[in-house]
Every structure is written in structure tokens, then in C-alpha cells.
Image (tube, rainbow, N blue to C red):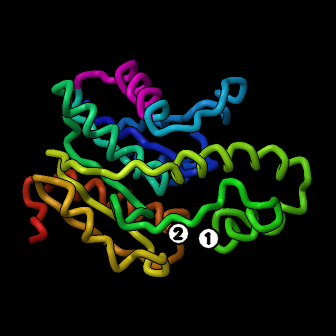
Amino acid sequence: MKPQLFMIHFAGGNMYSFSALAGALRPFFTVELLELPGRGKRIEEALLFTRKEAVADLLRQISARRNGAPYYIYGHSMGADLGFRVCRELEMIGDRPACFIPSGNPGPNITKRERLAHLPREAFFKELQEMGGINAGMLEDEELAAFIEPILRADFEMLEKEDPVMYKIDTPIYAFMGDKEKYVTDIANWAIYTRSNFSFRVLEGNHFFIFNHSAVIANTISYGMNQVSHLYKMM
């Protein structure tokens, strides 16, 4: 039986956001694509605006899909923020993941988060363009822009609410970031928040570097998980 890999999407994303990466991972894992309400297949459900609600929702999805195999949690950006909290909750019920894999996020209590959720529309989308998450073509499509705007604003409102992390997890952490990301030099911050092993890899690209490195990320994760007991501890 393949190990399971639960994937948590970034702000504004949905279960389809990881299509290429999930495809590259499937030879090694049973890939489980998680999705928050208000988007994708859950478009008819109400959006969430707090981490507490989002974590509870993700935990319900994981619990419903667990099949007894070893499993891993992967999250990009917002997904990494929520994934870390999900790992802690899973540890508290005695079902610890084999490894937590965050990407596009330097870990807790580092990011000086700019307040984006309530910016005027033009300024809001301008900030997102600079992050690399959306392109001009999306903004030229008024119907598409109107569709994604409330989802993005809800996700950013969630992230912008103060919720400092004052704890560590027992799960090993293997982190990825793009070399052009604002906080890439802080990637080793993740080591502070695990009592177990830590390793990382920096790849070329901006915040959404994952779209250009699916095969590399999949191979690195697969190899890293096979060697998880040998991941080095950052001191």
C-alpha cells in the first residue's frame, strides 16, 4: 500500500491547483487533494474566515480518508500555515504524520503580513500580481475576477488575523521555497518548530515556483520520505 499524501492548497486555490504536482507525486503516493469550502467542488458551501474553522474542516477531510497507511501532509503558502496547525491536532489525537512538507512559507512568526484583504480592488489585485499568483489576463476577464475575488479576500482575511504559534510539533519537517521569495533566507526558521528532524531545499523561482518544478519536488519528496530517518537536525 502506498503512503498517503494530503495536499492543502494556497490562498485562492482549490483541489485542482496542484494538478501537475499531484500527477508527478502519484507514482510514489496515494495523493489526497484537500479543499476548503467556497471553491472547486465545494463552491456552494460558505467560505471560512478563521484558521480554527479551516483546521477543523481539514481534519474532518483527513479523518474520512485515512486508510491506515503511513501518511504525509503537504501545504503551499496558506496551506503550509494551516498544515502546521493540522499536524499539531493530529499529534494530539495520536495519529502523527510521518512528515510535514511546507512550501512557499518560512514558518510561524516570521512573515510581517501586509494587510491585503480589505484593500480596494485595483490595489488588491496589484499586490497579488506582484506575488506571482495571478496574471493580467485573469484581471481582464471581469467574470473570472469577480469570481475569484471573494475567495481570495476570505483567505487573506483568515491569514491576517493574529494567531501566533507558541508550540512545537513532533513531526519532522522538510521545507521548500523559491529563491526569489521575500522570506527565503528565513526558511530554517521551521527548525525551531519541530522537536524532530528538519531539512529544506530552495528552488529557482518566485512564490509559485512549484508550478515549474513538479518533477523535482516530487522526486525530492519521495527520496526524502524514504530517507526520513536520516534527515538532519538544524541546530
* Residue type indicated by callout 1: Met
Tell me the residue at 64%/43% (across/down).
Answer: 154
Element type at marker 2? loop
Determine crowd level at label 1: few under 14, some 14-19, many 20+ residues with C-alpha closer than 10 A: some
Label 1 or label 2, whichever comes before in sequence order: 1
Query: Which residue in the structure is indicated by mark 2?
Result: 207
Q: Quarter of the image holding residue 42?
A: top right
Q: Quadrant of the N terminus?
A: top left
**Is 25 drawn above or below residue 182 in the view shown?**
above
Mark sitting on residue 131 = 1
* Residue span colored magenta: 55-68
* Residue type indicated by callout 2: His
In this view, the residue farthest toward the front is: 162
Tell me the residue at 74%/44% (across/down).
Answer: 150
Position of 136 compared to 91: left or right? Answer: right
Between 165 and 180, which is closer to the camera in this rendering? 165
Determine crowd level at label 2: few under 14, some 14-19, many 20+ residues with C-alpha closer than 10 A: many
Q: Quadrant of the C terminus?
A: bottom left
| Rendered location of residue 194, percent (x, y) | 17, 54
Tell me if residue 230 is in the magenta stretch. Answer: no
Name the dominant secondary structure of the magenta segment: helix
